[in-house]
Amino acid sequence: MLFAHLVRTNARVGVASAQPAARKSLPLVSRRVVAYSTFSRSGRNDTRSVGKFVLGWSMAMAAGFFAYHSGIGSLPSQTLGLSHLANGSANGSDGNSERDSELDNGLHFRSSDGLPEGTLTSSEGTHYASADELRQAISELKETFPEEGKVLTDQESLVGHSYSPSSYHPTAPHAVVVQALSTEDVVKIVNISRKYRAPIVPYSGATSIEGHFNGVPTGSICLDMSAMNKILEIHEADGDLRCQAGAGWEEINETLKEKGIPLFFPLDPGPGATIGGMISTGCSGTNAVRYGTAKAEWFLNITVVLPNGEVATTRRRARKSSTGFDTTKLFIGAEGTLGIVTEATLRLAPVVPTRVAMAQFPDVQKAVDAVQEILKTPHGPNVQCIELLDDDMMDALNKGGNVENSYPVKDTLFFKLQGSQLGIKETSEVIQSIVRKNGSTHFQFAASEEEAEDLWQNRKYALMATMSTHPGSKCWTTDVCVPVSKLPQLVYETKRDLAKAGLRSTIVGHVGDGNFHALILFDDDKELEKVSDAVHRMVNRAIALDGTCTGEHGVGVGKLEYLDDELGENTVELMRTVKRAIDPLNLFNPGKLYPKKGGHKNH
């Protein structure tokens, strides 16, 4: 069975962060880097191997793509997804905007070794390393890390570490990729970065879809933390563990299971996501309705390397502390712009028996009404997940999912209930009564654990199912979040808008949180322009409903233009003030998260 283009994400950032064999080299789509593929799946999914496969695949695809268009050793701006600087941005800029001119920092004029020449000034006015200084930085990195494979400057690595096949935001290759194995390694790399004023971009899971690990046009050091993936300590009695930032949440839970420890880490952003990226994007996932997000208390402390090269551990391992403000949360959602997370202590939760059920409704409004009523009952805490799949998504699952018996094509809720056998039984009786009252036309439990896992995997791999129904299409996936009562209005208006634009799409959402993802397909530049405009309207619609431009994917470069409208200029300026205080040279992941005053209005 063919599935297309695995990627999910939330967490996911190059700061450590989720997104399978290429058919052929692909054309440039709307002056942005685009790639996709299909792969065969037989039997059940192994998310651990899938996540590792995706990382290698996306790097190989990126390198092959650039080599096809530019030839080895030549990287014209068009192949970097940056020709919008000269021709007008793909999302509506006229080519003369302040943002376009700010980003054009010599990227069109690269020397024979691929390093940028000319004036190297960031959009914030920071003077970054010249080409000669970048060469000196690379030389010092090679002296500091002489082991083979630790410092990479080949085109495949530089491009592969700066590009996501699931992102349609402008990017540039890094100047060098350096692999770190420890906090001490990160300190050395940060000190060299500061010495030469070379921007540094952390990277690990490579699952971000908002451009979090994109290269800096002036030339950047990519800090590859994917090998910092060790679990350092497990404290079963205390219900916590300490790990490196490159450890994946799936591997952590699999290790606990293999060791017979009845605990798990409940944040589940998607295949391939790693702890550093999950922290840096403030991730969540399907479990959020029961366990919350990264901004809850799941990270007891973190170890970060600051821009000045100093190492800070935010607090001790105690479950709670009232010693000052919470510096851990200063870095959660900061997207690698304030400090580079190298280790974290995770709070674990007990493994609880679960059962999976499905209910179908005549429309989204009735489904959401049922959810709100269920969560307000005494049995609400027994609901671990509630996922919404619209009728188009159910049709896609029938056509491209791992489905033995087709589902009715209706708006559908997937439930995961948790608790004792008696607790699940009582909760299920309450849910069945409520969904019937709200017009549910079909309700069923998974008959076995295997069926339950297959049912839930269909939800987790919704994107693959969506794309497999239209082989050869690409997909823009994005998320927004609104108060739960506003979700039906947002879904209806978005579906109506996409249909009016002639775009094919599916919708999946964490309905208990008011968070949903639109998966929008396109085939060419013309359709991509329509998709970009439709996403812009959807985001503005969500903000107008007192919502947010992103519930879990993060800002990166893709959502920069919405922060002033959502948060207000004073709040955004407060964020900038914190950034300037901690990173005065603007070396940590520049160009992400903080919109420039008066800039980043692309629509």
Image (cartoon, grey):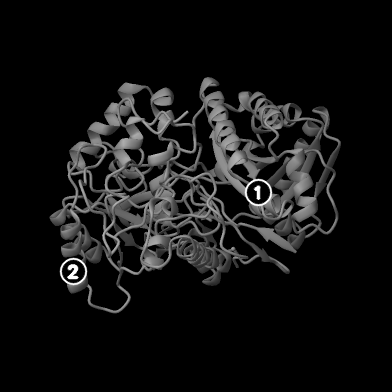
x then y, percent, for residue 414: 72, 44
x then y, percent, for residue 314: 27, 48
Q: Nearer the viewer, residue 415 or 70?
A: 70
Kind of residue indicated by mark 2: Ser
Q: CA distance from mark 1 to mark 2?
A: 55 Å
Horizontal side, residue 326 vs residue 511: left or right: left
Secondary structure of the residue carrying tag 1 is strand
Is 420 situated above or below 449?
Answer: above
Q: Nearer the viewer, residue 237 or 222?
A: 222
The nearer-to-camera label among 1 and 2 is 2
Count of marks overlaid on the render:
2
Q: At 31% across and 31% down in the image, what residue appears?
A: 596
Q: Quadrant of the N terminus?
A: bottom right
Decide if residue 192 is in sight here.
yes
Q: Which residue is mark 2?
A: 139
Q: Which residue is mark 1?
A: 418
x then y, percent, for residue 266: 52, 52
